[in-house]
Amino acid sequence: MIEFLTHDADLIRIAESVSSGTRLSNEDALILFERAPLALLGMLATAKREQINGKRAYYNRNIHIEPTNICLFRCKFCSYRRCSLDEPGAWYDSLEDIYNQAAVYQHKGITEVHIVGGVHPLHTLVDYIEIVKTVKRALPEVVVKAYTAVELNYIIRKAGLSLEEGLVLLKEAGMGAIPGGGAEIFDTEVRAQICGEKSSAEEWLATHRAAHKMGITTNATILYGHIETYRHRIDHLARLRALQDETGGFSAFIPLKYRSVNNSMSSLGEVSLPEDMRMLAISRLYLDNFDHIKAYWVMLGKDATELALAFGADDIDGTIDDTTKIYSMAGVADQKPSMTTSQMRSLIARMGYVPIERDTFYREIL
Ligand code: V47
Ligand code: SF4
């Protein structure tokens, strides 16, 4: 079968080695990025994905809460941050606002609230804790998946606590999981160019390591398709695979495509759809110790998400109900992102997979 797709001896060797369960090396991952036909990547990633998840493809019922987009950092790819409330498009929600946003979803079957936002210069750890408690007061049953490692690192250090001490307080307040944001690209030089002010790669990884050691599961992301090279992407995946070997605490990996509208890297434009599929498939193959690869439909768009299920993704994220602005402000087509559960189920079924509603921890909701 492989010979129908390529006559390249390296690719045939890599395909056979991956198919027999051998771990992909960095050198071979680079060869796949540079030379593998998309059809071969789709075939290999699908085999790997079906070995791990069978025919199951996951979605969840979730909303986002983004308390503020005022941020003291100035990441060059970010279309969403504002300096202060005086700027058009800035917002800052009070605890009462946050309670009301969450309370709308009482008895509506939501299982997860994802909280992420700008790093507000005046916020303290107590504010972060109160936000989590407020959401839990409105929706006691949901899992609160809260704060990127960048937000956590900043706010916990600002409180003068160790990561462990800060995470315990947040866990006690109701933080049930940690999302994957803020990872961007771990390579020091690329990171310095696109988001040099915020937490380093080492700090991001240390935060997730500390969470895993306390039994808090987390996700991981990469921001690809800007100034990074394939080698930088592989270095990023390598660091994640090593941490997962150590702790086993990651549940999903989410490749985030750089979206180029309204930010200071806009002149770069965006990578193509085939490049998105290449990234997903190689992530699936490389991260052999991650159970789930998520195609985040809000970022990819619905059509590309459908296709992603043929390139190794087994999760498409959630219903969202128009509660996140990160991607609409960066120019994606869906300016009010929302999907019903039946739309999600039929998207999955059209690709030949069995739709499974899951909670944050990939337990099936019956
Ligand atoms: O860290 C910001 C990214 C992330 C842009 O864990 C951009 O389940 C592309 O991490 N183009 C936050 N990306 C979102 C995130 C996430 C989303 C969905 C699910 C999960 C999960 C996590 O958004 C940031 C940054 O990498 N981002 N601006 C942009 N212009
Ligand atoms: Fe702030 Fe996050 Fe935007 Fe960076 S990506 S500027 S940390 S809101």
Image (cartoon, helix red, strand yellow):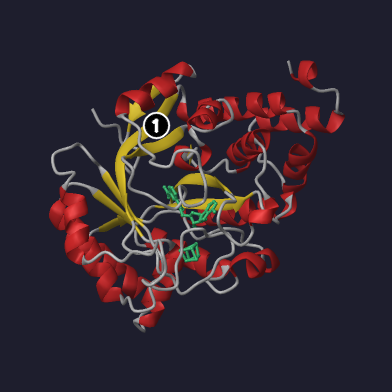
Q: Look at the numbered disc 1 and give the secondary structure of its residue.
A: strand
**x and y, in percent, of residue 346 in the image:** 39, 20
How many labels were placed on the picture?
1
Please state which of residues 71 and 124 is positioned toward the viewer in this rendering: 71
**x and y, in percent, of residue 297 in the image:** 46, 37
Q: Quarter of the image holding residue 317?
A: top left
Q: Quarter of the image holding residue 116?
A: bottom left
| Quarter of the rendering occupied by the N terminus | top right
In the picture, measured across the screen, residue 198 lies left or right of residue 120, that is right
Q: Amino acid at mark 1?
A: Tyr
Residue drawn 59% across the image and 64% down it: 76
- Residue at the bottom extreme? 160
Residue drawn 43% across the image and 23% down it: 347
In the picture, measured across the screen, residue 341 lies left or right of residue 349, that is left
Q: Which residue is mark 1?
A: 58
In the picture, measured across the screen, residue 115 lies left or right of residue 232, that is left
| Residue 80 appears in the figure | yes
Residue drawn 30% across the image and 75% down it: 125
